[in-house]
Image: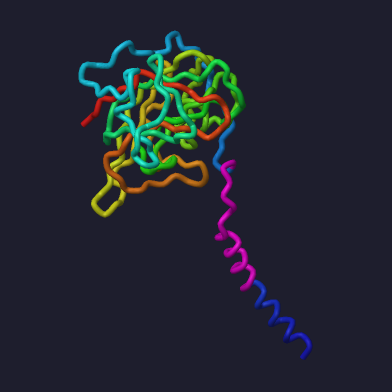
Amino acid sequence: MIRRPVIALLVVLPAVAPIEAEAQQDAPSPARPEATEIWEPAPPVVRPSTAGIAARPPSDAIVLFDGTNLDEWVNSRDGEPAGWTVGDGVVTVDKSAGNIETRRRFGSFQLHLEWRVPLAITGAGQSRGNSGLFLASTGSGDGGYELQILDSYGNATYVNGMAGSVYKQSIPLANASLPPGEWQSYDVIWTAPVFAADGSLESPARVTAFFNGVLVQNDFELRGETVYIGAPRYRAHGDSPIKLQAHGDPSPPISFRNVWVRPLP
């Protein structure tokens, strides 16, 4: 008579325990940016023999910035004039103005862009010359697909967030960074994602990128939009603007020049 309740209790407990374990397994973990940072192995340092800077764009290119004005660009937030500072043939980020993006929308393309971290740069890690080239912008903030811009010349940070990375998706094949104060270049082949009429993904985005003439992304297939926290995913979109980021860190702003694009079929 005394043992029956004990036996019943022992039978019930194994049935309850897996349910509790399953509930714990399904519970979402706290969202932290550190959860998607990769710190090693670091890519090899390659000192480029040339910055890969093109003197003039090809004859069929659309010149997005020729050193004189930002007529091809608007503010990403409200579509008003871009608001960054143009002078001496370069455009310098105005962090208070926010991101800027092209008036035109593009699918797949070849793009050339030159950028310079100021000689008097301050800060460390992600707070040192941070900006971004968004190959397709999908929102007024940081929505889209980012090729990271950062001072990675002797500046330690997570390697999937260094210069030449597809932000938090693909570590660059090499660190081809030049010192602050020198002009650097990106040459990019962007294959835009394709979506079906119902919004499902038909073919993912791919990117090939040269950093100062050194291959750093070799036809990498993106897993979705680049995000600061969490896992990447795709959201259906069509042709999109190209965006340049005004990162909110306190370091002095970077500059750009000689930006052109060639739409591809």
Total count of labels: 0
Looking at this view, name the residue that lies furthest to the top: 49
Horizontal and vertical percent position of residue 134: 39, 34
Please state which of residues 52 and 259 is positioned toward the viewer in this rendering.
Answer: 259
Horizontal and vertical percent position of residue 74: 34, 34
Q: Is residue 135 visible?
A: no
Q: Is residue 239 left or right of residue 180?
A: left
Quarter in which the C terminus is drawn: top left
Horizontal and vertical percent position of residue 113: 37, 22
Q: Is residue 118 left or right of residue 236?
A: right
Please name the residue shown 67% across and 74% down the image.
Answer: 13
Q: Is residue 138 left or right of residue 152?
A: left
Please name the residue shown 26% across and 54% down the image.
Answer: 198
Q: Which residues are magenta?
A: 15-34
Quarter in which the N terminus is drawn: bottom right
Q: Is residue 179 visible?
A: yes
Main SS of the magenta segment? helix
Q: Is residue 56 left or right of residue 175?
A: left
Please name the residue shown 23% across and 52% down the image.
Answer: 197
Judge whether residue 49 is colored magenta. no
94, above or below 4, in the image: above
Horizontal and vertical percent position of residue 37: 56, 37
Judge whether residue 33 is colored magenta. yes
Please state which of residues 197 and 2 is positioned toward the viewer in this rendering.
Answer: 197
Please name the residue shown 59% across and 52% down the image.
Answer: 30
Please state which of residues 258 and 229 is positioned toward the viewer in this rendering.
Answer: 258
Coloring scheme used: rainbow
Looking at this view, name the residue that lies furthest to the right: 2
Quarter holding residue 126: top right
Looking at this view, name the residue that lies furthest to the bottom: 1
